[in-house]
Amino acid sequence: MKENNSDKIKKLQKKNQENQRKYIKKRESEEKKAAQLTHQLVAKIDADPHNYHHYYDLATLLVEGKSYEQAEELLMKALGIFKTADQDVLDTLKFGLGNVYYAAEEYDKAIKIFQEIDDQKLQSEAYIMLAQSYMAKGDNKRAMVFALSAQSTRQKDPVVNQMIGDNLLALGNFSQAADFYDLTLKAEPQNGKANFNRGLVAMVLGEDFEDYFKKAKQYDPTYFKNGQQKLKDIEKFVQLNKKKPNQD
């Protein structure tokens, strides 16, 4: 029996070591690829310093690598270089800078930058990022204003409709939240997060909810698992509301 247990432990240790080697190899490969892309983009900037796209692309790559200070420095430099350029160029670089701050969780700085964007092509994207920034700060009322502004030109966009649903859910406007989650699920029926939150809303409204949770668990098991506390909170809310008429 002891030998069997020992063999199992050795096999498990060997498997763990193999998984660790695979992880390290994959990470090294990704780091090498990122370094090559960075080198290529730096070379592009050196060869053509008046192409603003190269600065934006390099900053995006730096954000993916969580090099936020470098990305900020690069875009601030680019904004100086292109200060007399057309508004769409400046706004594209500002949008990139706003994304840097958002990724670095500096939401107040992100909000300030996104509010400066006037270019029509980027306006709805800026509204979305403003909404997400305010949501990250826990300010759902302000987030709603910008989410609805984005929705005025992107009425069928599931990302925007889900964002509105999330804000309405946080604000306790369950019936309206249901409408926007339904719009989201019409476009993306396999959206696990939207299914889960629609299930929460269904519980409050006294609708059938099991199918929503079943789909949520199937399509996004991580979100489903992490949302169990939220589910318990909604269950308590429903139970308290059931008891209220009896207490009067």
Image (spheres, rainbow, N blue to C red):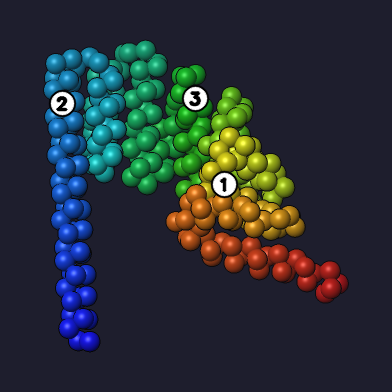
Give residue 207's position: percent from left, percent from top: 73, 55
Where the N terminus falls, by quadrant? bottom left
Q: Which mark is residue 123?
A: 3
**Sequence-wise, which precedes: disc 3 or disc 2?**
2
Q: CA distance from mark 1 to mark 2?
A: 39 Å
Neighbourhood count class around disc 1 (C-alpha, 10 Å): few under 14, some 14–19, many 20 upward: many
Q: CA distance from mark 3 to mark 1?
A: 25 Å
Secondary element at tag 1:
helix
Based on the displayed image, in which of its 4 quarters is residue 153 positioned? Answer: top right
User: Disc 3 marks which amino acid?
Assistant: Gln
Is 244 displayed left or right of 109 in the figure?
Answer: right
Which residue in the protein does label 1 denote?
194
Neighbourhood count class around disc 2 (C-alpha, 10 Å): few under 14, some 14–19, many 20 upward: some
Farthest bottom residue?
1
- Judge by depth and name the residue closer to the eye, 23 or 181: 23
Q: CA distance from mark 3 to mark 2?
A: 30 Å
Residue at image point 75% right, 66% down = 241
Based on the displayed image, in which of its 4 quarters is residue 11 positioned? Answer: bottom left
Which residue in the protein does label 2 denote?
40
For residue 169, say whether it is visible: no
Compared to residue 174, the image places residue 160 above or below, namely: above
Q: Nearer the viewer, mark 1 or mark 2?
A: 1
Give residue 189's position: percent from left, percent from top: 57, 41
Compared to residue 73, the image places residue 80 above or below, namely: above
User: Disc 2 marks which amino acid?
Assistant: Gln
Q: Which mark is residue 80?
A: none
For residue 158, say whether it is visible: yes
Residue at image point 17% right, 83% down = 3
Neighbourhood count class around disc 3 (C-alpha, 10 Å): few under 14, some 14–19, many 20 upward: many
Compared to residue 166, the image places residue 158 above or below, namely: above
